[in-house]
Amino acid sequence: MKLNTIFAALLLSQSAVVVAQDQHSYANLDQVHSTHVYLDVAINFDKKELEGFIEHTLSWHNKQAKQLILDTRDLEIDKVMYKGADKLWHPAKFTLAARNDVKGSKLTINLKEQAKLVRVYYNSLPQASGLQWLTPEQTASKTQPFVYSQSQAIHARSWMPIQDTPAMRVTYNARIQTPKDVRAVMSADNKDAQFKDGDFHFDMPQAIPPYLIAFGAGNLEYQQMSHQTAIYAEPTILAAAVAEFDDTQAMIDKTNKMYGEYAWGRYDLLMLPPSFPFGGMENPRLSFITPTVVAGDKSLVSLIAHELAHSWSGNLVTNATWEDLWLNEGFTSYVENRIMEEVYGRDRALMEQSLESAGLKKLLPTLPEGDTILNLKLNGRDPDDAFSSVPYIKGQLFLIYLEQHFGRDKFDVFVKQYFHDFSFKSLTTKEFVTYLESNLINKYPNIVSMDKVNEWIYQPGLPADAPNPVSDTFDKVNANSQAWLAGQATLSSLPTDQWTVHEWLHFINTLPRDLSLAQMTELDGAFKLTQSGNAEIAFAWFMLAVGNGYNEIYPALDKHLSGIGRRKLIVPLYKTLIAHDKKQWANAVYQKARNTYHPLAQGTIDALFQ
C-alpha cells in the first residue's frame, strides 16, 4: 500500500461516523467522537500517579448534542474546560458516576455549545489497572524506577479519560515529563526520545484505537538494528535483545511482499521488565516485549512475528468490539505463521502450528462451551475474559482451512485486499462475514459453503474437518520418546543435541502424566530440565513435574514464579499447584511475589486463592 493511499484511508476513517455498539464503553459515539487527542502529563514516581490533562478534538454527529461521555476508571477529575466559539477557554460542568466493577466510572461532560476542543484535567491513582509502577529494585538495572502502560482491552480508561472502545480511532500528540535520568517512549514517532532531558514530545499521525496508545519510561537505552528497526531496553538486556531479534527487518520485508506495504514507518521494540503480564503487546511503531523470549538462540522469535503481524491485523484493521477479538488475533496468528515460514522455513512453521493446535485441543474441554465460539458473547463480562487460545488458534485454523480449500494463490489475494479495504477501520464479525461471502465464497463457488463458515464462527468447538497440523519432525520425537518409555533406548541415546525448542516442548508435553519418580529423576538428571534457561521449556517441565509429584523442582519453581510476571508462564502453574494439594506452598510464593506482578496478573491470581 502506498503512503498516499494510506493517508487517504486515514482521513476517511477520521471523518466517518462511528456507530458500532460496544457494551464495554459508556461513550456516546452516535453523538460525538474524538478524532485527535493531546496528552500532557507528568510522571510522579513517588505518588505513582500521572498528573496533567488530555485534550479531545471532537467531531459532532448530532446538531443538537452538547454532551460528551468519556470512560474512566479510578481517576480523579480536577476540572473540565472547553474552547468556545469566542476562542476562549470556559469551565464545563461534569458528573463522575459511581464505579462499575467492569466498565469503571462514566464521565459526563455538559457543554454550552458544540465545542471543538475539550480538556480534562486529572490524575491517575496508584491502583490504575493499566499501569505498572516498579521501584528501582524491581527492575533489571536497579538504578531508576520504571512505569509502563498496558491498555488492552479496556485499561486505557484507568490512566486517561477517553472513549475507550476499539470502535473508534484517534490520532494523538503527547508531552510526557519525567525525572531527568528517565527516558520515555510511546507508540508513536519517538525521534524526541533520543534525547534524555525529562521533557518528551510524541506524534502519532495515523488513527489508532485508544487501546493502542501506550508509553513506557525508565532506564532505557537505544540501539538500531536496521534502517527501520531498533530496540529500547534496560542496559542489562539491550545487547542480548538486539542479537535475538535482528531478523526483524527480514520479517517486515517478507510481510510487505505478502500483504502490502508496512503502514507505520518505523517498527521498534521496547523490552519490558520481567513483570510484564503478556508475551508482547502490538502497540504501533513500538511493540512491547517480554524478556522471557530472549532465549539466546532465536527459538522464541515467533512472538516478534506475531506482534509485527498485528501491524496489519489488529492495528491497521481492528475488531470493533472485544466480542470480535478473533478478527485481531486469529488473523495475526495466521500471518505470524506465514512470516515464520518465509523467514525460517516450512518445517519450523509447521512445528509451531502443531504445538499450538495441540494446546488448543487440550484447552477446549476445560472451557465453558460458549467460550469456544469465535464470535463469543461476553454478556457484560470483563473483555479480558475473551483472551484465551480460542480467538488466536481456532481463528488461525479457520483461516488455514480457507487457505487449504481455496489455495494460497486465491486466499493471499483475498487477505491482502481485506487489509487494504479495511485499512484504518474497525469492523464487526458480521461485517467480516458479509465481506468474506462477497469476496471469496461467492467469487469461487462450490468450494466452501456459508454453512461451513457459520459453523466455524458461530458454533462451539472445532468442526470435524478442521485442519490437524502434523509435523514429521514430531513423529521422530514421538518414536524416541516411546522407545525410552518402553525400555528400548536410554535417554543418552536420544538425538537431543539436535532438537529445537519446539521438539523439546513436544517431547515434554506428550510425556505421560503418570511417570514414576524414578523416570522423572532420570529425565532431570540427563537433561537438567529443572535448571533450564528457556522459559517455555522450564514451564512445560514444571507443569509435568507438579503433576507427577517430583519435589526436586520447588526451589527452581519458586524462582520462576517470583522472577517473571508473564501470565502464560505463571497462571497455569498456580492452577496446577492448587489442583495437586500445593495451595499453601503456592500461596506463600504468591504473597512474596505479588507486588512484583502487574495488576492484570494480580487480579487473575487473587481469584485462585479466594
Image (tube, grey):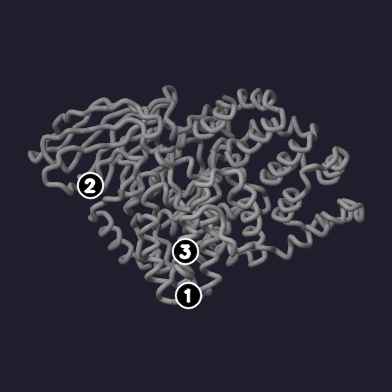
Distance between the alpha carbons at the discs numbered 1 and 3: 17 Å
Distance between the alpha carbons at the discs numbered 2 and 1: 38 Å
Query: As shown in the figure, which amino acid type bears the numbered disc 2?
Result: Asp
Compare residues 47 and 553 and report the one nearer the observer: 553
Residue at the image point whose x is 51% and y is 46% from the top: 371
Q: Given contact means CB atoms under 8 Å apart, are the residues at marks 2 and 1 in contact?
A: no
At which x and y percent is residue 205?
32, 53
Compare residues 413 and 97 and report the one nearer the observer: 97
Say which quadrant the C terminus sits in: top right
Task: Please tell me in which quadrant of the rendered image residue 553 appears.
Answer: top right
Residue at the image point whose x is 72% and y is 32% from the top: 580
Query: As shown in the figure, which amino acid type bears the numbered disc 3?
Result: Val
Is there any visible trace of residue 120 in the rendered image?
A: yes
> Which is nearer the N-term, disc 1 or disc 3?
1
Q: Is residue 267 above or below residue 523?
A: below
Q: Given contact means CB atoms under 8 Å apart, are the residues at marks 3 and 2 in contact?
A: no
Query: As shown in the figure, which amino acid type bears the numbered disc 1?
Result: Lys
Q: Nearer the viewer, mark 1 or mark 3?
A: 3
Within-10-Å neighbours for mark 2: few <14, some 14–19, many 20+:
some
Horizontal placement of 395 versus 324: left or right? Answer: right
Q: Is residue 513 above or below residue 454?
A: above
> Element at badge 2?
loop
Within-10-Å neighbours for mark 3: few <14, some 14–19, many 20+:
some
Distance between the alpha carbons at the discs numbered 3 and 2: 31 Å
Disc marking residue 453: 3
Disc marking residue 575: none
Within-10-Å neighbours for mark 1: few <14, some 14–19, many 20+:
some
